[in-house]
Image: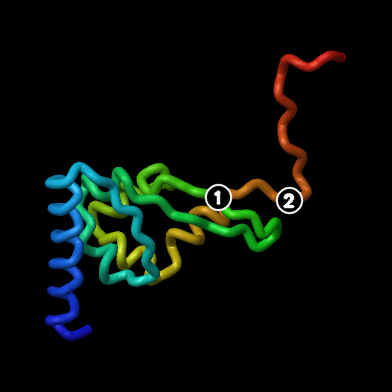
């Protein structure tokens, strides 16, 4: 990716953060661009979510990025954009999903 494009993504993210702080607003953004995810700092990642649609059930689930298994250890050496580009985020969710043929555990409090 040309340097100018990467730099523009960084500036776009910084402008959005500055505008949110100054105007006390929240912005919800969505991207499939791994380069943009590279610029998220620790504070941004605390708010970052992964929306994943199960191939089996076709239902969407929302996951906190920092709650994914082993993510903090990986982020010490890799950036979030790289993990997204390699498919690691989706794999982390996929391999931690319960199998569709497994019954959900029953919740207590029902009559017998």
Dot 2 alpha-carbon crowd within 10 angstroms: few under 14, some 14 to 19, many 20 or more: few
Residue 67 coordinates in the image, percent (x, y): 41, 42
Residue under circle 1? 61
What is the basis of the colouring in this image? rainbow
Q: Is residue 7 left or right of residue 46?
A: left
Position of 36 relative to 27 (above/below): below
Query: How many dots with numbers?
Result: 2
Residue 57 sits in which quadrant?
A: bottom right
**Could you tell me which residue is drawn at 70 percent across and 59 percent down?**
56
Q: Is residue 28 left or right of residue 89?
A: left
**Could you tell me which residue is drawn at 78 percent across and 49 percent down?**
101
Q: Is residue 36 left or right of residue 61?
A: left
**Could you tell me which residue is drawn at 38 percent across and 49 percent down?**
65
Disc 1 vs disc 2: which is toward the camera?
Answer: 1
Residue under circle 2? 100
- Sequence order check: which comes first, mark 1 or mark 2? 1
Residue 10 sits in which quadrant?
A: bottom left
In this view of the protein, which residue sits in the foreground, 23 or 75?
Answer: 23
SS of the residue at dot 2?
loop
SS of the residue at dot 1?
strand
Going by the picture, which residue comes out furthest to the bottom?
Answer: 2
Going by the picture, which residue comes out furthest to the right?
Answer: 112
Quadrant for the C terminus in the image: top right
Dot 1 alpha-carbon crowd within 10 angstroms: few under 14, some 14 to 19, many 20 or more: few
Q: CA distance from mark 1 to mark 2?
A: 15 Å
In this view of the protein, which residue sits in the foreground, 33 or 101?
Answer: 33
Quadrant for the N terminus in the image: bottom left
**Could you tell me which residue is drawn at 45 percent across and 67 percent down?**
87
Q: Is residue 99 left or right of residue 42?
A: right
């Amino acid at each position: 990716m040309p340097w100018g494009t990467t730099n523009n993504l960084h500036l776009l993210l910084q402008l959005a953060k500055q505008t949110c702080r100054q105007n006390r607003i929240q912005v919800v953004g969505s991207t499939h661009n791994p380069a943009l995810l590279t610029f998220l700092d620790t504070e941004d990642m605390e708010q970052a979510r992964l929306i994943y649609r199960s191939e089996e059930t076709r239902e969407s689930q929302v996951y906190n990025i920092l709650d994914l298994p082993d993510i903090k250890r990986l982020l010490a050496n890799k950036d979030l954009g790289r993990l997204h580009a390699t498919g690691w985020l989706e794999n982390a969710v996929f391999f931690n999903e319960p199998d569709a043929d497994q019954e959900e555990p029953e919740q207590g409090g029902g009559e017998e």
